[in-house]
Amino acid sequence: MEVPGLAHNITSPLSPCEGMIKDLSLDAIQLCERDGSKSQDGSISEMEELPVPQNIKISNITCDSFKICWDMEPRSKERITHYFIDLNKKENKNSNKFKHKDVPTKLVAKAVPLPMTVRGHWFLSPRTEYTVAVQTASKQTDGDYAVSEWSEIIEFCTADYSTVHLNQLLEKAEVIAGRMLRFSVFYRNQNKEYFDHCREAQENRMLPSVKDNSGSHGSPISGKLEGIFFSCNTEFNTGKPPQDSPYGRHRFEVRADVLFSPDTNLYFGDFYCMYTAYHYVILVLAPKGSRGDEFCKQRLPALDITNNRFLTCKQNEDGDGELVFHHAQDVILEVIYTEPVDLALGTEAEISGHQLMSLSTVNAKKDPSCKTCNISVGR
């Protein structure tokens, strides 16, 4: 039985209102800002006969829902009318700072057959650790509740975005991608020390590293996918890469066909902004059959390399076999290549522009209020 949402019209912190929201034939969960098992005004009383939930199990966890069930002693089981669920985010240094702190997470649901689904993107965030405890309750004729003791506290962590959620992000990104511009090179900016290290300690290669936590909080590639970030955006008036970069004054350029060809799979990874007008799209380039390709196949929407709104690779219409490349004009593309790249495959030089640190997306947090790049699940 699914508990589809929350009601917001609780008249008392300890006495949930009668008006449960209906979703089809299902009773919804309600907010109940309670603290403890007794109220100061006596509206909730304890009853020895009510069983305490035992052996709580959490299953079917998604980025904004989970199923919960438990065992109970048969005594007085028939008198249970409601469940009180105490759901709290487990605070830690990596917690999602954009989860609204003022949203109550003490929930009340009518006693429905278990397991019960708890769902709500306004109080559940992806990739976030929570604690949950349960109480059984019996509504009395005077409107008050008799309650059991609280169960043991169980911990669980919500999941990443699924491909369903990523496809919703993909559709939003397509709306603003703009027209396609031709380009010929991928480039990567870093400081001089980075490239010196590649030559001296990594056999002249740039090696993949684990993606940081920039972008959507529920992105399945953050902290998991290994790759090398490249850019491909060009200036409208010159058709060449910009001379400014937030990542360093030294730039490695490589021909587009070295990284992107019919032997490469292309995946959509994320769509986000950082409280600015600029929007970013993360794409993944993975050679077919590579470890990165296998990772992405299971988690990310695949794009047709010849026909998508962000990054394309096509045969030249002249029929000479040359590959032609285009990128979207109105979004900033962050392209992750999943394999090592030898510096001998391209050129390295110092750019003439500035290092614009304010535009760096390293561990950048997504603006949860942006209507352009957010979907109706946990941010």
Image (cartoon, rainbow, N blue to C red):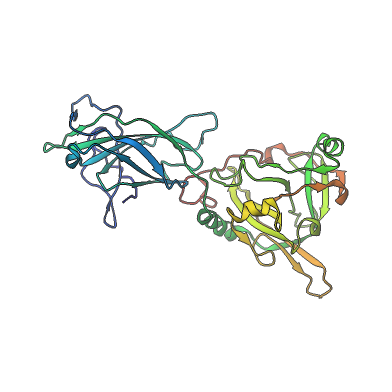
Name which residue lies at 64% across and 56% down. Answer: 267
Q: Is residue 312 left or right of residue 217?
A: right
Depicted 30 relative to depicted 180: above or below:
above
Answer yes or no: is residue 54 visible: yes
Q: Residue furthest left?
A: 141
Percent x, y for residue 304?
Answer: 65, 65
Name which residue lies at 64% across and 40% down. Answer: 212
Answer yes or no: is residue 238 visible: no
Foreground residue, 338 or 347?
A: 338
Q: Residue furthest front?
A: 74
Name which residue lies at 74% across and 68% down. Answer: 314
Percent x, y for residue 323?
Answer: 79, 66
**Residue 141 location, quadrant:** top left
Foreground residue, 65 or 74?
A: 74
Q: How many marks?
A: 0
Percent x, y for residue 40?
Answer: 22, 24
Depicted 310 relative to depicted 115: above or below:
below
Percent x, y for residue 176?
Answer: 60, 58
Q: Is residue 95 left or right of residue 139?
A: right
**Residue 348 location, quadrant:** top right
